[in-house]
Amino acid sequence: MGESGSFEDGQQLTVHLPAPAECRLIRDGSLVDSRKVTQDYSWPITQPGVYRLECYRHYLGKKRGWIFSNPIWITEN
């Protein structure tokens, strides 16, 4: 569970969704970006840290948690 890797210039984290959702990228416990993703999206990684993704969908009139990724550790070289 979870993955790790070394930080490199031009690195990205990519999500592939089967349905549209509101996604939040979190690094070291702080929100980096929040956006609606329809299918595929890539976030550029500009610094090391512990990343994870949360995706939410509306169901029965409420926003509900759908995907909560395991952490991805991006460490310095």
Image: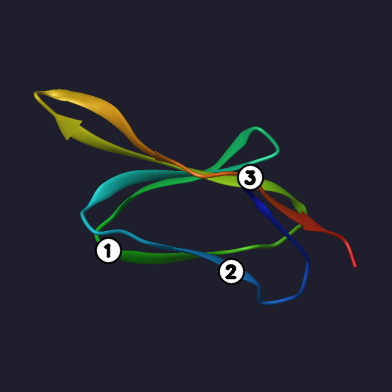
Name the quadrant containing residue 46. Answer: bottom right
Q: Quadrant of the C terminus?
A: bottom right
Residue picked out by circle 3: 71
Residue closer to the observer: 18 or 57 = 18
Instruction: Name the spot of residue 14 as percent of width and height, x first.
Output: 48, 65
What kind of element bears circle 3? loop
* Earlier-in-chain disc, 1 versus 2: 2
Instruction: Name the spot of residue 76 as percent of width and height, x first.
Output: 87, 61
Instruction: Name the spot of residue 35 as percent of width and height, x first.
Output: 36, 48
Residue type, mark 1 in image: Gln
* Earlier-in-chain disc, 3 versus 1: 1
Sort mark 3 into few (<14), some (14-19) or many (20+) by Cα contacts within 10 Å.
Answer: some
Residue picked out by circle 1: 39
Residue at the spot 66% in from the left edge and 77% down from the top edge = 10
What kind of element bears circle 2? strand
Residue type, mark 2 in image: Gln
Residue type, mark 3 in image: Pro
Sort mark 2 into few (<14), some (14-19) or many (20+) by Cα contacts within 10 Å.
Answer: some
- Single out the mark in the foreground, 3 or 2: 3
Instruction: Name the spot of residue 59 as percent of width and height, x first.
Output: 14, 30
Residue at the spot 18% in from the left edge and 33% down from the top edge = 58
